[in-house]
Amino acid sequence: MMKQSLKYVSCFVVAISLGGFVRANDRPNIVIIYADDLGLGDLSCYNPKAAYKTSHLDRMAAEGIKFTDAHSPCTICSPSRYGLLSGNLVCRTGRGPTAFEGPGGPSYLKEGELTLGDMLRKQGYRTGAFGKWHLGLTWHDKDGKVLGGGFKTPPLIDYEKSTPLIDGPNARGFDKSFITPNCPGTDPLYVFIEDGMVPIPASEQHDPNSLPNPGGKWRWDNDAGWKSPGYRFEGVDELFFEKTVNFIKEHRKQTPEKPFFALLSTQIAHAPVLPDPKFNGKTQCGPRGDFIYQLDDITGRLLDVLKELKIDDNTLVIFNADNGAEVMHTVWMREDYSHDAVGGYRGMKRDGWEGGHRVPMIFRWPAKIPKGVTSKQMINTTDLFATLAAVTGYHLNDEDAVDSFDMLPVLLGKQDEKQSIRPHMLTQSARGEFQLRVGAWKYLDHVGSGGNNYHKPELEKYVLPEKAPEAKGQLYDLAEDLGETNNLYFSQAVKREEMQKLLRILTEKEGGRTAPLGR
């Protein structure tokens, strides 16, 4: 305890001598590009056998650091987005994983909970969120009653009583926002929300047959429901990109002395697959290949804007995804184009196996991050919170971001690759079941996938022989068995019991956490 106290005293002295932990003028601008349903095999910098090239993201990786052992907090979108913006696993909310539909809510982000936007605003940043939100929102009917989710409730919304939204981005740490409440092309209600207001309410019924049908099946998962007149389905990410760039340019024009934080949360590569028409046919890999080509192009154009504004050198750009590739997308890309979206791992979106939560993660910051680094450090999306706190000099309280580790030493090339910053890592499957990593050991506190039903005809071909059919969980040594094929639940009982005990401690309802105290 004395050493800990002395550590903080010495830091405080250094801070005073430098005029603060990080001078405001030295703090980088921050951009996060947060992709949807994107597997590790979907980028050619991770997958040399990819059926197309992601040249801009490959360049971003070559000019920064690429993590090969990066994970989403959950294997579906809403809980992972909560992890990004809070630094916490969704189990800390007392709620289970949910993919919100219609007027679903309230938000996972509770009032008073420190968010990434809050933290960066406290550090002098101007903040903006653009694209898919999908964290849950509170909507009211004409009597003031809070509406539940589902596709039938959107017509009951009273927009005057519901807006400005009490738990939208502008109430959770963002100065500017332009978002969709749920998945832009999947989950009605289909409206755009700008700074907590809905300029054009949903007053029309949407017919999926009104949309183009590239490749036949690729329009799958565009649900009928309620939309705003003129709502944009095709190429909606071009709109999100424009809003992001406008935010950056206006900020640089009006308040260039302040740093900015922009979150660009894309529809790509979530179903339905509807690239902007100008990208149709850009690859030989059908609509989904074109979709990811568009995502890569957006990344390249965003990097170009930073260069044009002469802020490229001191802008930290982070690329990440919310979970692995969608089930049918994975199946169709394998069958039609010999492309493995999950990069050879077992499982896909919703599953607790690696393919469900091992995702791309790339950092680029020319002023600070060495070029061309590939790191095997275990890292989670939740770690962006503590890492950006370290980048900007923010001191996290113990109750903040309880599942977030500071990875800045890795980014700066000051961490021995043989020494893992994380002693352990938790993830959750679509059903809320836990997976625990300790080094190369992985324990799944459930049988089967934790998500998808592999008895369905389209997935039966991916069923692997079960070597411990009586086991109530799964234990794998990823150092020897990265494909999670040999369940060591019984043969390594001591290791299994050790990990079960640790899991109980980390997931306690009161005081459960994975990050260390006193960061």
Image (cartoon, rainbow, N blue to C red):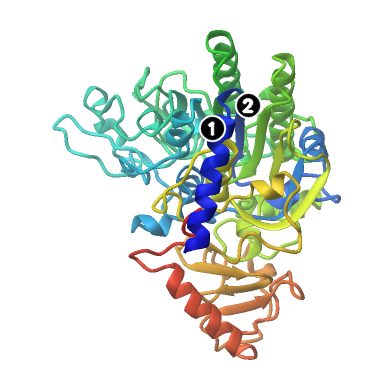
Does residue 500 sit above or below 174 in this rendering?
below
From the viewer's perspective, tell me whether residue 225 is left or right of residue 435: left
Tell me what residue is drawn at x 34 percent, y 66 percent: 509
Given the image, on which type of amino acid does mark 2 rest? Asp
- Element type at mark 2: helix
Given the image, on which type of amino acid does mark 1 rest? Gly
Disc 2 versus disc 1: nearer the observer:
1
Residue of label 1:
20
Q: Earlier in the sequence, mark 2 or mark 1?
A: 1
Does residue 255 sit above or below 426 in this rendering?
above
- Kindly tell me whether residue 205 is visible in this rendering: yes
CA gap, disc 2 and disc 1: 11 Å
Which residue, as the protein is rendered here, is positioned at the far top? 253
Please name whichever residue, 88 or 393, is drawn nearer the observer in this view of the structure.
393
Q: Where's residue 115, x and y in %?
A: 43, 40
Label 2 crowd bin: few (<14), some (14–19), many (20+), radius 10 Å: few
From the viewer's perspective, tell me whether residue 342 is left or right of residue 387: right
Q: Where's residue 28, x and y in %?
A: 63, 29
- Kindly tell me whether residue 515 is visible in this rendering: no
Residue of label 2:
26
Tell me which corner region of the image, top left, top right, bottom left or bottom right, holds residue 61: top right
